[in-house]
Image (cartoon, rainbow, N blue to C red):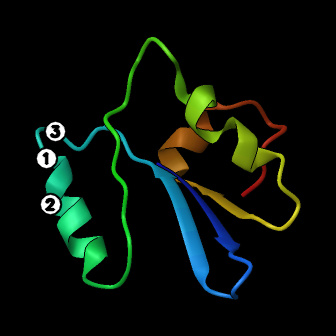
Amino acid sequence: WFRGTEYQDRGTLHYHSLVGGVGDIRRLLFKDFWELHGFARVEKYEADRGANYYVGKYLTKEQADIRFSHNLKQELSGRVEA
């Protein structure tokens, strides 16, 4: 998984995530959970776009707290730190 955490202009936390390897989980299950505490938008991953399409812009933001799962870090070069 990948997770980017940042603060919105109004001071509330805002998350961006990319989660894989979870099997056949209903995307609306996540949406229902997150909407209990605010707003959620869950999109289906399109493999032909690649992960960079989804997370690239968050990796370059200065104020974002970026985290990667241990398994994902093993697949990346040593340039990425969590």
In the image, what residue occupies the spot 69% across and 88% down? 11
* Label 1 crowd bin: few (<14), some (14–19), many (20+), radius 10 Å: few
Q: Amino acid at mark 3?
A: Gly
Q: Is residue 6 left or right of residue 48?
A: right
Disc number lying in front (2 or 3):
2
Q: Answer yes or no: do the residues labelled 2 and 3 have beta carbons within 8 Å?
A: no
Residue placed under numbered mark 2 in the picture: 29
Q: Is residue 59 above or below residue 31?
A: above
Q: Is residue 65 left or right of residue 50?
A: right
Disc number lying in front (1 or 3):
1
Disc number lying in front (2 or 1):
2
Q: Amino acid at mark 1?
A: Ile
Which element carries disc 3, helix, strand or loop?
loop
Residue placed under numbered mark 1 in the picture: 25
Residue 31, image x and y in percent?
25, 62
Name which quarter of the figure residue 39 lies in: bottom left
Residue placed under numbered mark 3 in the picture: 23
Q: Which residue is outermost to the right?
A: 62
Which element carries disc 1, helix, strand or loop?
loop
Q: Nearer the viewer, residue 25 or 79?
A: 25
